[in-house]
Amino acid sequence: MNWKVVMEEAETCILCAEPFKGTMSWAVFWGMTTGSNVCERCREKFELIHKKKSCNGCSKPHSSEEHWLCDDCTRWQKDPFWSEYPFLNRSLYSYTSFLKEMMARFKYRGDAFIAGV
């Protein structure tokens, strides 16, 4: 087996289907973990939400304040009907157009393969 060829093989991104050079490590080589199946360009499109800069109720991003509730969560807490129900939503990533498309592929177009992301 030519190890140099194996190390230089390109992976295919499961989101954009473009070839990319995956990272090879001993953990990947010995099967202890899998390599990344998403290219760097697609990975950068996921915008991580920082907990300290988001609404404590729904994770809606906010610029600077800590322990902040957005207008929607404040309104729901004041509503007599909804105030008795606890509401908490934690999102990891902002719902950008890229993430919206990925969710549509998964939920509505049956692309279950991207669940591995």
Image (cartoon, grey):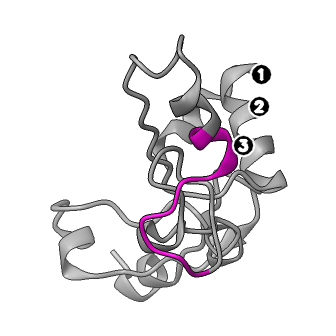
The residue shown at (46%, 39%) is 89
Quadrant position of residue 13: bottom right
Mark 3 is surrounded, within 10 Å at the Cα level, by few (under 14), some (14 to 19) or many (20 or more) other residues, namely: some
Mark 1 highlights which residue?
A: 109
| Viewer-closest of 10 and 108 | 108
* Marked residue nearer the N-terminal end (1 or 2): 2
Q: Is residue 71 above or below residue 105?
A: below
Residue 59 position, x and y percent, is 53, 53
> Which one is nearer the viewer's eye here, 98 or 52?
52
How crowded pointer 1 is (Cα within 10 Å; few <14, some 14-19, many 20+) is rated as few
Look at label 3 and name its amino acid: Met
66 magenta-colored:
yes
Q: Are marks 1 and 2 in contact (CB under 8 Å)?
A: yes
Q: CA distance from mark 1 to mark 3?
A: 10 Å
Q: Is residue 57 above or below residue 78?
A: below
Q: Looking at the image, do the residues carrying marks 1 and 3 touch, with CB atoms under 8 Å apart?
A: no
Q: Amino acid at mark 2?
A: Ala
Secondary structure beneath disc 3?
helix
Q: Secondary structure at mark 1?
A: loop
Q: Residue at x 52, y 73 (%)?
A: 53
Q: In the displayed image of the protein, which residue is found farthest to the bottom?
A: 4
User: How far apart are the alpha carbons under marks 2 and 3?
Assistant: 5 Å
Judged left or right of residue 14, residue 68 is left
Distance CA(mark 1)–CA(mark 2): 7 Å
Q: Which range is magenta? A: 64-74
